[in-house]
Image: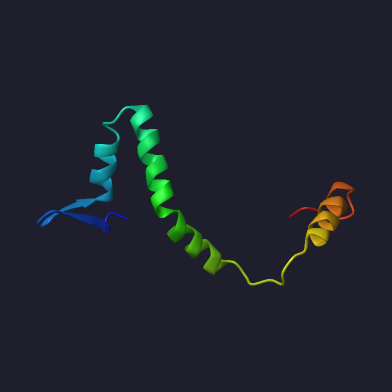
Amino acid sequence: MESLSLELGGSKKMGINEFLRLFNQFSKEEQIKIAEKIALQTFADRWALLDSALPDTDELTEEDIVLEVKATRDGEKETP
């Protein structure tokens, strides 16, 4: 993973390990804020990656979901 890097103004690059060392210098509260901001900024890209890995399925109706929940709850269907 270290091969990923960020170019910082000019030719200086920061790799993942260097970023994590810098990140670890922040307080826990600041780390949480930074992580939340990163999560928000990368959500669309992460979702697109996950979505592309999921198989396409027919549209589920609310009734389909309710029947599935009831079948699982009643033990008629085993959960994976």
Q: Measuring 86% from the left and 51% from the top, which residue is drawn there?
A: 70
For the C terminus, the image quarter is: bottom right
Image side of residue 65 versus residue 55, left or right: right
In the image, 7 versus 20, the foreground residue is: 7
Q: Position of residue 38 (x, y in %)?
A: 38, 46
Specify the quadrant of the image occupied by residue 22.
top left
Q: Position of residue 63 (x, y in %)?
A: 83, 60
Q: Is residue 64 above or below residue 36?
A: below
Image side of residue 50 versus residue 76, left or right: left
Q: Is residue 65 above or below residue 28?
A: below
Q: Measuring 77% from the left and 53% from the top, which residue is drawn there?
A: 79
Colour pattern of the rendering: rainbow
Q: Position of residue 45 (x, y in %)?
A: 43, 60
Which residue, as the protein is rendered here, is positioned at the far front? 62
State the count of labels: 0
For the N terminus, the image quarter is: bottom left
In the image, 61 versus 13, the foreground residue is: 61
Q: Measuring 90% from the left and 54% from the top, which residue is drawn there?
A: 76
Q: Position of residue 65 (x, y in %)?
A: 79, 57
Q: Is residue 70 above or below residue 33?
A: below
Specify the quadrant of the image occupied by residue 55.
bottom right
In the image, 12 versus 3, the foreground residue is: 12
